[in-house]
Image (tube, rainbow, N blue to C red):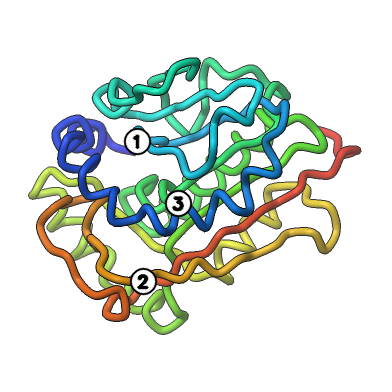
Amino acid sequence: MSEASREQFDRIADRYHEAAESWNGLYEQIAVHVNPLLADKVVLDVGNGGHFAYDPAIARRVIALDISAEMVARIQLPGIAKVVGDARDLTGIDDASVDVIAFVFSLHHITGRNLQETFSTLDRVLASAQRKLRPGGTLVIAEPVLPGWLFRLQTWVFPASHALLERLRVGMIFFYSLRQLRERIAARVPCRRGEMRTFPLPVKGRIDPLGGSFPGRISIPSWLHPLRYRLITVPVAADFER
């Protein structure tokens, strides 16, 4: 993630907090699947942004990590360990020290300067998460994904999109297709055979589609939104070798 992204999220922290209320229905759906995974667990929430898509009181310990100090400062819940850090290396988090790692609507913000660098950055983030997880832990990813044809279109316009957002001092975003995301997870994280699960997260009502980049600018009916939200849970094999 570039310095522009760090500055951007510091700049929009207040507006982002308000825009995120339009995603409360998504957070509630995620909690249904994630809360049962948290009892007496150490949780690392990467790209937290001041919002929890689960009940942190269930966990033994929750570490909320974000690249933006302003975002971290908005976490008001007691007992949360707050860390300003980068998802690409998770410096400061001990290896094999975490039971659950959650990326909730954050991976599309962790990009590179071009397509190749963006894919390698995702691989680097997943590899870093795998190192921090204890064997037998769980990786949780909630992401908006694109259908195949829109994903391909996005790859074609990547250079122009990157140039425009760079001029605006806004961090690049890149949405994966569900197939692409699952394949890259499977290649980097030793999941127990056949146990990676994907859950649809239907969206109803109105939603802020630009909340992560231009929060509060527009609100649209959810059926007009081209992105589809998915939750992926990945139980890590208990016997894998690092």
**Circle 2 sits on which residue?**
204
**Depth check, front residue: 201 or 55:** 55
**Circle 1 sits on which residue?**
49
Residue drawn at 54 percent across, 53 percent down:
30
Q: Which of marks 3 and 2 is nearer the N terminus?
A: 3
Q: Residue 27 carries which label?
A: 3
C-alpha separation, residue under disc 1 versus residue under disc 2:
22 Å
Q: Type of residue at label 1?
A: Gly
Residue drawn at 52 percent across, 64 percent down:
230
Instruction: Provide the secondary structure element on which disc 2 rests.
Output: loop
Would you place residue 191 above or below residue 96 in this image? below
Residue drawn at 24 percent across, 24 percent down:
70
Q: Residue furthest bottom?
A: 149
Q: Earlier in the sequence, mark 3 or mark 1?
A: 3
* Residue 238 appears left or right of 25: right
Q: In which quarter of the image is the C terminus?
A: top right
* Residue 190 appears left or right of 198: right
Please tell me whether mark 3 or mark 1 is closer to you in this view.
3
Q: Which of marks 1 and 2 is nearer the N terminus?
A: 1
C-alpha separation, residue under disc 3 versus residue under disc 1:
13 Å
C-alpha separation, residue under disc 3 versus residue under disc 2:
13 Å
Q: Residue 60, how many percent across, how many down? A: 66, 22
